[in-house]
Amino acid sequence: MDALPMDDVPAIKVYLGLPLFGTRAPPGGNQELGRRQAADFAMLLFKPAVEDAAEELPRVITELQRRGCMLPGQRIGLFGYSAGGSAALIALIQGKVTVGTVMLVNASTGLNTSVQALERLTKQPYHWTAASGVLAERTDAVRHAAEIARGNQPPALLIVQGSSDTVLTPKPAIELHDVLQPYFLRQADAPRLKLVLIKGMAHGWVDDSQAADKVRRLTRDWFDGE
């Protein structure tokens, strides 16, 4: 909320916390998160924090409608950074709510990408199970490009990636853009899909004033333009 207030965007902004993080942290806090990561990153951390966040979106929409913040059938915009970007992509794959505009920043494109980031960080291999393999398949945005681009008009999707991101490298973002592009071209919606690589931007863009300014400008222009 502090890094990206989006005051220039004429819309109601709702900032959703990921399960298990921030005010939704489990008893034990970071120690418990570390235990979950070591025991089974996919099923004990990625699934409840990322996939379950996407599962919550229909209930969020229902609550916003109950409070009079939006009307039934109105399209929404999603912004997701890192794991939040993966949650936004999973919501698009599931297709349970109508989404008009999406912006991703240094986003994971699914469990496979997140596991690769974990292995780079810890220098330890993740031990896959049958359950985590199924989770990886259903959260893989590249494999589910057709679902993301479903409908007569796919959601306007801006993929922003830092060239110096060593946590989630540019490769998955580029791959996602390339696999989605034919769907947008087929429907003459090429301008609604865009990839922006920001030179020198690391994963933690909030701590870089120049990168943060670029992300804020892109956010304003993308959501205001839609």
Image (cartoon, rainbow, N blue to C red):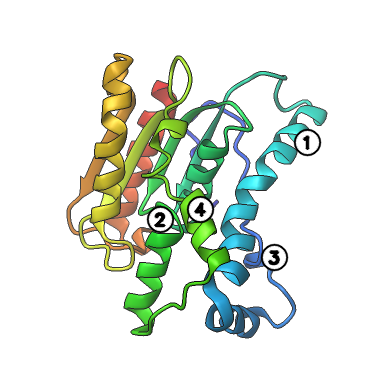
Name which residue type carries label 1.
Glu
Disc 4 from disc 1: Cα separation: 20 Å
Give the labeled residue for mark 2. Answer: 108
Name which residue type carries label 2.
Ser
Name which residue type carries label 4.
Gly
Q: Is residue 214 at least partly visible in the picture?
A: no
Residue lying at 45% horizontally and 14% vertically, measured from the top left: 152
Residues tagged 1 and 3 counted as in contact (Cβ below 8 A): no
Give percent across and percent down for residue 15. 61, 47
Task: In the rendered structure, find residue 82 and report the number of the disc placed on it.
Answer: none
Residue lying at 38% horizontally and 81% vertically, measured from the top left: 125
Give the labeled residue for mark 4. Answer: 84
Residue lying at 58% horizontally and 82% vertically, measured from the top left: 39
Give the mark toward the camera: 3 or 4. 4
Left or right side of 202 for 2? right
Task: In the rendered structure, find residue 23 and report the number of the disc placed on it.
Answer: 3
Q: Secondary structure at mark 4?
A: helix
Q: Which of the two discs, 3 and 4, labels the residue nearer the N terminus?
A: 3
Q: Secondary structure at mark 1?
A: helix
Number of disc labels: 4
